[in-house]
Amino acid sequence: MALAKRDEGSKVSSEINVTPMVDVMLVLLIIFMVVTPMLQKGISVDMAKVNNPAPMQDADREDALLVSITRDGKVYFGSEQISVDGLTTKVKDRLASNSQNKQVYVKADMRARFGSVVQVVDAVRAAGVDDLGLLTDQRKTTPSAPPAPAAQGQ
């Protein structure tokens, strides 16, 4: 009479199956690649860099009134392109529906013509906006001070 021996331990695999984990990671990567461009608010411009920018946290709010000027002079209100002449009425309409926030933020490209920025500021002021914010970026490194003039021989 022989004893029946169970051989269940030989069927167990001790290797980790990483295929489901790779599938999940690829799905997450695709989701992040699709969603990330949608997170940016407004139009992408290369703003002027300054040493001490004034913090304007309200510009990141979803209901903030944001006017963007690209380097080629195109004007955007939010994410829609608009003419400078139509900007005044558009800002007036938005301020009428949003009475608690009367601040408009202007985000201009550093290579935009100065005249187009002045036209946009004038159009926004004509809409009755008194509180206008000019958005800038923090300069990465501060420029070094110019060398002191050498003392003349006495």
Image (cartoon, rainbow, N blue to C red):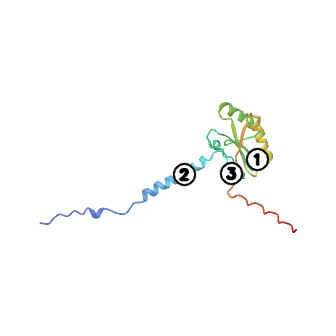
**Depth check, front residue: 42 or 143:** 143
Q: Secondary structure at mark 1?
A: loop
State which quadrant residue 88 falls in: top right
Q: Which residue is mark 1?
A: 73
For residue 152, side relative to residue 146 (left or right): right
Identify the amino acid type marked 3.
Answer: Asp
Question: Which residue is depicted at the point 39% across and 60% down?
Answer: 17
Question: Which residue is depicted at the point 56% across and 48% down?
Answer: 35
Q: Give the Cα separation between the discs numbered 2 and 3.
A: 25 Å
Q: Secondary structure at mark 3?
A: strand
Image quarter in which the N terminus is found:
bottom left
Q: Residues within 10 Å of mark 2 (few under 14, many from 20)?
A: few
Q: Residues within 10 Å of mark 3 (few under 14, many from 20)?
A: some
State which quadrant residue 134 falls in: top right
Q: In the rendered structure, which disc, 1 or 2, sits on the residue that comes first in sequence? A: 2
Q: Give the Cα separation between the discs numbered 1 and 2.
A: 32 Å
Q: Give the Cα separation between the discs numbered 1 and 3.
A: 20 Å
Percent of width and height locating residue 86: 75, 37
Residue 32 numbered tag: 2
Residue 137 numbered tag: 3
Viewer-side label of 1, 3: 3
Q: In the rendered structure, which disc, 1 or 3, sits on the residue that comes first in sequence? A: 1
